[in-house]
Amino acid sequence: MKLQLSRTDLGDLNLFRRVAEAGGFRRAAANLDLSPSALSHAMRGLEARQGVRLFNRTNRSVTLTPAGRDLLQSIQAGFAAIEGGLEALNLYRDRPAGQLRLNVPSDAARLLLAPIMADYIACYPEVRLEVVTQDTVVDIVREGFDAGIRYGGRVPVDMIALPLGPDLRWIMVASPEYLAEAPTLSRPDDLKHHKCIGIRMGTGRIFHWELGNAENEIIVTSDWAVISNETVMSIELAENGAGIAYCLEGRVKQQLASGSLIEVLPKWSSMGPGFHLYYPSRRQLPEALRALVRLIQRGPQ
């Protein structure tokens, strides 16, 4: 006898897929704006109707049973086709619609997105845009994001990457008050006598400052005076005289103009890869995301 697929079954199968791909109820619930208990209840209902256990549940983890793994493999292509079909409808609309979730580092959020977001919202009111600013590196597929932004050269190899702008200039800055009391600073070797503010990257590794370019490149490792994993805090520490910060020139444009920060060793600034948007290679680029890329590449008007 052929089983009849109800509307409830179809919706719950999609929820099952999202739980399986996210690796747990809590992460999937956060991605779906549902409570974990509601999601768990829906899955128990699906299991009861089908008469098959799909998840192994313990206090610490949720894993798929063999039946659950087979089901996931069977339905993923179908739901991908449905999502692709719905996305294709945007070609027939005057403006794209739907939900768009992005994961971006704080530098990209401030330098790329903040200047153009008002224009995007005004031009595409039918798009529900969610931007999660997070310097920690995450698996955007598992976390339910449509796309992410990273510096060029740090995009996962299984992703499609689109450049969003030119290379970026990295500089060192300090407050006038700090420099007035600090030792002489005329060459990179002098940094060992200064208070340097370290950066812990999204991968968890402490970043070593890259000064100069090509044959003149110098890598600076220091007995850091303080380490921060947030650009804003590093800049504020430098403004308050805590030491020398290393950051993107664009992040301190206003401070440099006002004089609250001064660039040090400007001849030893360095150029690094620009920001890239990336998304899974098995998905097409959503129209809402394509529109956002166009605005970013055009820049604020």
Image (cartoon, rainbow, N blue to C red):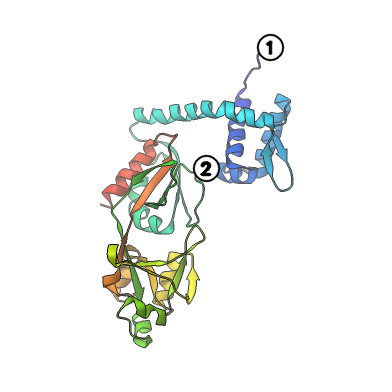
Would you say 104 lies left or right of 68 here? left
In what element is the residue under mark 1?
Answer: loop
Q: Looking at numbered disc 2 in the image, what kind of residue is underneath it? A: Gly
Q: Is residue 39 visible?
A: yes
The image quarter in which residue 125 lies: top left
Instruction: Report which residue position mark 2 lands on.
Output: 144
Residue at position x 48%, y 77% from top?
225
Residue 285 horizontal/vertical position (percent)? 39, 36
205 or 16, nearer to the observer: 205
Which residue is situated farthest in the top direction here?
A: 1
In what element is the residue under mark 2?
Answer: loop
Instruction: Report which residue position mark 1 lands on.
Output: 1
Would you say 245 lies left or right of 2 here? left
Q: Is residue 276 above or below residue 93?
A: below
Quarter of the image that includes the N terminus: top right
User: For the residue carrying disc 2, how many other residues have a C-alpha within 10 Å: few (<14), some (14-19), or many (20+)?
Assistant: some
- N-terminal of the two: label 2 or label 1? 1
Residue 138 horizontal/vertical position (percent)? 51, 50
